[in-house]
Amino acid sequence: MVRQYGPTALSEARAEMQGEAARLLVATYGVEAKAMLDAAKALVARDPRLGKLLDATGLGNSGTVVMKLASPAQGQRARGRLK
């Protein structure tokens, strides 16, 4: 079997990663999952370099990365440091 790594395969991989990230957020934060994702996105938006890196590598779709960002984002938002 030959694996192909064209644009379609990359899009499918990113979609799978997004789904896994969503499942992890819901499993961990329940009804607050969307708010946590929004907080993580706001945290990343503070440093455009990080956003570009996550977009370029596809790691912004990784469940592990999203969860690592959600926790500090929650703390920043609770302290009023994140919109």
Image (cartoon, grey):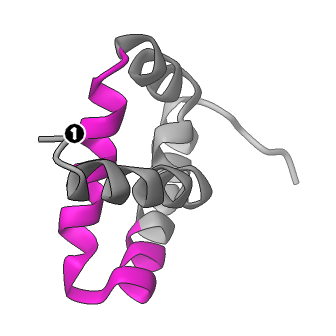
Q: Going by the picture, which residue comes out furthest to the front?
A: 79
Q: Quadrant of residue 2?
A: top right
- Vertical placement of residue 41 versus 19, above or below: above
Majority SS type along the magenta span = helix
Q: Residue at x 23, y 59 (%)?
A: 78
Q: Nearer the viewer, residue 16 or 37?
A: 37
Q: Quadrant of residue 63?
A: bottom right
Q: Residue furthest right?
A: 1
Q: Amino acid at mark 1?
A: Arg
Residue 14 lies, with reference to residue 37, above or below; the image says: above
How crowded pointer 1 is (Cα within 10 Å; few <14, some 14-19, many 20+) is rated as few
Task: Give the residue drawn at x 24%, y 51%.
Answer: 79
Tell me which segment is drawn in magenta. Answer: 22-47
Split into 4 quadrants, where in the image is the C terminus?
top left
Queried whether the magenta region covers residue 81, the answer comes back as: no
Q: What is the x, y in percent for residue 44?
A: 36, 32
Report the residue at 43% width, 78% height from top. 23
Q: Circle 1 — which element?
A: loop
Q: Residue at x 44, y 11 (%)?
A: 49
Q: Position of residue 1 (x, y in %)?
A: 88, 54
Q: In this rendering, would 69 be left or right of 45? A: right
Q: Quadrant of residue 70?
A: bottom left
Q: Residue furthest left?
A: 83
Residue nearest the viewer, comparing 81 with 64: 81
- Looking at this view, is 35 or 24 the one in front? 35
Q: Which residue is mark 1?
A: 81
Q: Is residue 26 magenta?
A: yes
